[in-house]
Image (cartoon, rainbow, N blue to C red):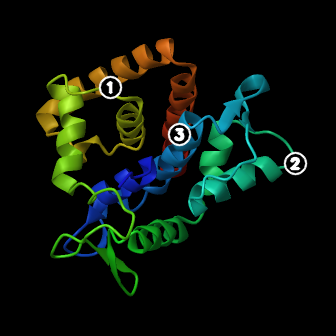
Amino acid sequence: MMLTLYEVLFLLILDEEKGNLIWFTRKSFAYPLVGLILAELALSGKLGVGEKLRLVANEAEPTGDAILDGAMDQIRNAEKMHKPAYWVSQMSEEPKKLRQSIGEQLVAKHILIQDEKRFFRPDEPTDSPPGGESMVPSKFQLKHELRALVLSDGESNLRNIAVLKMMAAGDLLCILFTQDELEAAEQIIHTQLLTAALENPLMQLVEEIGQAVSAVREDEME
């Protein structure tokens, strides 16, 4: 089953024992999640850049994902175009609502189970719903793939680079790396993204979104 970028991050920051987000992510998790919503739209070609780095909705065709389509509607229906930082700030204004929406979407996909406002991985692997491709990777598998990309020259792809970039922008790399690994990991991720941006214009927009996430988070946390 294909996870969206923001679903990958949600699963990484979910405390699977307590059913809530990992405690140190709760103040600022919405910023990198919104960054990945925008990055998903950018990588799919549905989001582009207009004058002065303002975001533009490229296509009217919906994605079929309620959260992605909701973000596209906000951008499309705005009275004027705005830069990524504006949208990161706007779309992260209700973090509890965002958390609940993503959690409930993963429940609908048979990836999580829900107990009131808490979300858990099932004790036993849940089969994919009818027509599903395969079971979703475990948190360990998600972490291993992202760590391998940075520490052992693992298979590189734009989606994983985008996840790493937003985690770096949201100060969440400690979920993947030890304290001793962090400095080198941050530098490698920065280099990977710059290289990808030189080769692919879509990643240039992902870089802009990542910078917006970092700037908004720093402003809001002061």
Q: Residues within 10 Å of mark 2 (few under 14, many from 20)?
A: few
Q: Identify the residue under disc 1.
A: 189
Q: Is residue 6 visible?
A: yes
Q: Is residue 18 above or below residue 23?
A: below
Q: Nearer the viewer, residue 110 or 172?
A: 110
Q: Earlier in the sequence, mark 2 or mark 3?
A: 3
Whether tag 1 and tag 3 are in contact, CB under 8 A, the answer is no
- Return the disc, 1 or 3, that comes first in the chain's sequence: 3
Residue located beneath label 3 in the image: 39
Q: Position of residue 23 (x, y in %)?
A: 29, 64
Q: Residues within 10 Å of mark 1 (few under 14, many from 20)?
A: some
> Residue 22, can we see it?
no
Q: Position of residue 90 (x, y in %)?
A: 66, 54
- Could you give the CA–CA distance between mark 1 and mark 2, rounded to whole angstroms? 36 Å
Q: Residue at x 50, y 50 (%)?
A: 31
Q: Nearer the viewer, mark 2 or mark 3?
A: 3
Residue at the spot x=44%, y=73% of the render?
108
Residue 115 sits above or below residue 6 on the image = below
Residue furthest to the bottom in view is 116
**Residue 179: percent from left, percent from top:** 15, 38
Where 109 falls versus 47 (above or below)? below
Q: Are marks 1 and 2 in contact (CB under 8 Å)?
A: no
Horizontal arrangement in the rendering, residue 41 relative to residue 174 (left or right)? right
**Badge 1 element:** helix
Query: How far separated are the C-alphas under marks 2 and 3?
Result: 22 Å
Secondary structure, mark 3, is helix
First reached walking from the N terminus: tag 1 or tag 2: 2
Which residue is outermost to the front? 131
Q: Of helix, strand and loop, which one carries label 2?
A: loop
Q: Find residue 144 and report its image quarter.
A: top left
Q: Which residue is mark 2?
A: 79
Q: What amino acid does circle 3 point to?
A: Ala
